[in-house]
Image: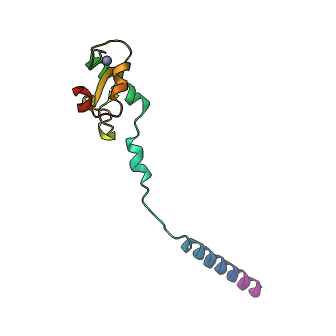
Amino acid sequence: MTRKKSTRKLFVDLESVVEELIVEEPEEVTEPEPVVEEMKIIPTPEEDAIWNDKVLNSFSKTCAKCGSKDQVEVHRIVNDPEKRHELSNGIVLCKLCGRGFDGQTYVEFMRN
Ligand SMILES: [Zn+2]
């Protein structure tokens, strides 16, 4: 009777030791993830659409270069994520003038 009881106690003690070992085992590796920073910059399509409309209206849907109202599109003056939704970073150009804008700075483009 007494023997049986002591055997059981030993088993319980071993179990608690094993539990303690398992708890101490995992190492804490907390490296900061830079992905979160990049995700903040990614705009939603809705934000882009709202900005697009604002720029179009501020130019009365007219090409800033030739004054045409045909096939006008919104272009970004600088490709800076922080200025992505600034009204002053948008320009409205017709399809023809827009082609010339690609690959040039805004200042160069308006001078020509
Ligand atoms: Zn134009």
> In the rendered image of this protein, does residue 25 appear above or below residue 38?
below
Depth check, front residue: 90 or 50: 90
Depth check, front residue: 96 or 86: 96
Q: Is 92 placed left or right of 9 in the picture? A: left
List the single residue furthest toward the front.
112
The number of numbered badges drawn on the structure is 0
> In the rendered image of this protein, does residue 73 appear above or below residue 43?
above
Q: Residue at x 42, y 33 (%)?
A: 44
Quadrant in which the C terminus appears: top left
Q: How is the image coloured?
A: rainbow
Place of residue 32 in the rendered image (x, y in percent of width and height, measured from the top left)? 42, 59
Place of residue 102 in the rendered image (x, y in percent of width and height, measured from the top left)? 36, 31
Q: Is 26 placed left or right of 30 in the picture? A: right
List the single residue furthest toward the bottom.
3
Quadrant position of residue 2: bottom right
**Magenta residues: mostly which secondary structure?**
helix
Quadrant in which the N terminus appears: bottom right
Q: Quadrant of ligand 1?
A: top left
Q: Residue at x 42, y 50 (%)?
A: 36
Quadrant position of residue 49: top left
Depth check, front residue: 72 or 85: 72
Q: Which residues are magenta?
A: 1-8
Quadrant position of residue 75: top left
Q: Residue at x 42, y 54 (%)?
A: 34
Place of residue 13 in the rendered image (x, y in percent of width and height, measured from the top left)? 64, 80
Queried whether the magenta region covers residue 103, the answer comes back as: no
List the single residue furthest toward the top.
69
Depth check, front residue: 88 or 71: 71
> In the rendered image of this protein, does residue 8 appear above or below residue 101?
below
